[in-house]
Image (tube, rainbow, N blue to C red):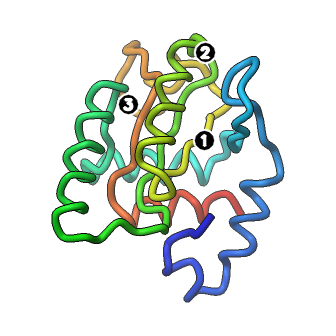
Amino acid sequence: MKLPKKLKVEEIEEQVLTALDKNKIALYDDSEIQIPLLTLTHELRQQIFYAKSLDELIFGYETIAKVLACELKGLKKVNNESERVSRLLIVSNDGSKRFYREFEFLLNKHGKRILLCRLDVDSELMGYLLGLGQKQVKAIMVNRKNSVVNILKALI
C-alpha cells in the first residue's frame, strides 16, 4: 500500500504503516480481506472532527459509492488512476455482513486509492463523536488528502 506522499516527505510513512498493520481484523466473518482496526484516541477523534468541520467527510454507503464513482470516471478521463491512498473509509464496528460486503465491492472497484479501516466504536457513538447527536453513522469517507494525512498521523 502506498500512502500519501506527504507522509513519505515527513519521513513517517513507515510508522503509519506499522500502526495500520498492528491490529487487523477480517472485514466480515468469512472474509479473506483484513483491514486495520483503529482504536479511538483523543488525537484520532480530534482529527476526524476537524475533517468534519472542514466539510471533508462524506456520510453513508450510498453517497460514498456515488462520490467514488464520479471521481473514478473523472480520473479515467484524464488517465490519472493513482496507486496512492487518497481517500480514507472508516466504518463502525456494528455493521452487518451485507454492509461490510458492500465495502468489499468498493475496495475491489476503486483499488489502491482507498483505505478501509474499522473504528472500534458502534454507529451511535460514531454519530456522537461527529457532533450529530443521536444520529447513527456507520460509514464515513475522508475525501481530502490533507485530512487523510492528518488522521493517519494521529495513529502514531
Task: Pick whichever, 44 or 108, lies toward us.
Answer: 108
Q: Are marks 3 and 2 in contact (CB under 8 Å)?
A: no
Q: Quadrant of residue 78?
A: bottom left
Q: Residue at x 49, y 80 (%)?
A: 6
Q: Residue at x 67, y 45 (%)?
A: 41
Q: CA distance from mark 3 to mark 1?
A: 21 Å
**How many residues crowd around disc 2 within 10 Å: few (fewer than 14), some, or many (20 or more)?**
some
SS at badge 3:
loop
**How many residues crowd around disc 1 within 10 Å: few (fewer than 14), some, or many (20 or more)?**
many
SS at badge 2:
loop
Does 4 sit above or below residue 105?
below
Task: Pick whichever, 79 or 60, lies toward us.
Answer: 79
Q: Are marks 1 and 2 in contact (CB under 8 Å)?
A: no
* Percent of width and height locating residue 2: 58, 69
User: Pointer 3: what residue?
Assistant: 131
Q: Residue at x 29, y 25 (%)?
A: 62
Amino acid carrying mark 1 in the image: Cys
N-terminal of the pair, mark 3 or mark 2, is 2
SS at badge 1:
strand
Amino acid carrying mark 3 in the image: Gly
* Percent of width and height locating residue 15: 75, 71
Amino acid carrying mark 2 in the image: Asp
Q: Looking at the rendering, in which quadrant would you find the C terminus?
A: bottom right
User: Pointer 1: what residue?
Assistant: 117
Give the number of the disc on residue 94: 2
Does 90 sit above or below residue 98?
below
N-terminal of the pair, mark 3 or mark 1, is 1
